[in-house]
Image (cartoon, rainbow, N blue to C red):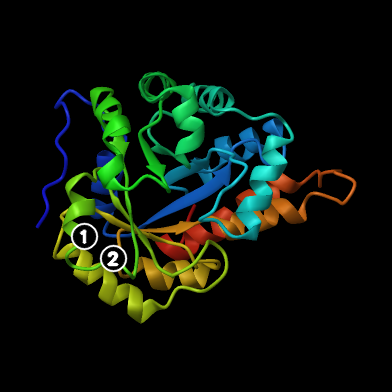
Amino acid sequence: MSAAVKFDARMDDRIAARFALLKKKNRPGLVTFVTANDPTPEVFREILEGMPSVGADLIEIGIPFSDPMADGPAIQLSSQRALKHKTKIADVLAAVKAFRETEIDTPIILMGYYNPIYHYGAQEFAQDAAVAGVDGVIVVDLPPEEAGELTVHLRANNMHMIFLTAPTSSDQRLPVILKEASGFVYYVSITGVTGTATADENAVKDAVARLRRHTGLPVAVGFGIRTPEQARAIGAHCDAAVVGSAIVDIIAQGVGKDGALDRRLSVKVLEFVKSLATGVHGAWP
């Protein structure tokens, strides 16, 4: 079994604390994804700030990128909408910092691609993200063999580097990935891009069991979970279910062809997140 990466004992580790709380409550968590500044900075912040109160246990924020190759049409379009506002990493970090003014417990994970981070500067990114209140980073196109130039700075700033595993990750490959992983392991339940297929419960059950033979880190399962029923079914076999494209689809539906926004868009998104939380957790107050 691969050992988890160790952090400074003084670290206020929100990710570890949240998974410990979920374990104490004997229930899986809900991880929600939304792209920063989609569809507008104002609506994005309304959604972000409302998610903890409707049941999101951890929140992933997508860093908009012009070529999100691992993502399907829904998230690709969300990046395009966000980039219309000239969204940069600094804007994403500013949103996290504002979120932290009122919410100190919910973990925030930034998810994206290495190109924007590289141009920002790996060391500067890690330092600024830590100050803003980011807890971890998922960089889709950065394999463990090439991640050292970023992970060294993340660890120096007590942030987690969360790696993806997939149905194609062999027993020989998993130790290489998990050696560098911390926070939790993100299992991609389908082969292909986001939002294009449905997760198979039995396959997820077997895959998570195999992952647990290699690591003691919590396992979150994403890609292919779109409904409260699917979130409940998948959550029964892992530590957290991740929902992204289905949330982003609701945002897209609230944007008219002329760019006009549904006035209740943030409310509709949060109502859907609440339904997901009810599916994963059971009744939610």
Whether residue 176 is situated above or below residue 199 in the rendered picture: above
Q: Choose between 190 and 255: the one closer to the eye.
A: 190
Q: Residues within 10 Å of mark 2 (few under 14, many from 20)?
A: some
Mark yes or no: residue 127 visible: yes
**Which amino acid type is shown beneath numbered disc 1?**
Leu
- Residue 179 is left or right of residue 21, and the answer is left
User: Where in the figure is residue 92, as x and y percent of width and height?
Assistant: 55, 29
Residue drawn 55% across and 22% down?
90
Helix or strand or loop: what does disc 2 sit on? loop
Q: Quadrant of residue 17?
A: top left
Residue that sits furthest to the right in the current view: 258
Whether residue 95 is situated above or below residue 174 in the rendered picture: above
Circles 1 and 2: CB atoms closer than 8 Å: yes
**Which amino acid type is shown beneath numbered disc 2?**
Ser
Residue where numbered disc 2 is placed: 169
Q: CA distance from mark 1 to mark 2?
A: 6 Å
Residue drawn 17% across and 48% down?
179
Q: Quadrant of residue 212?
A: bottom left
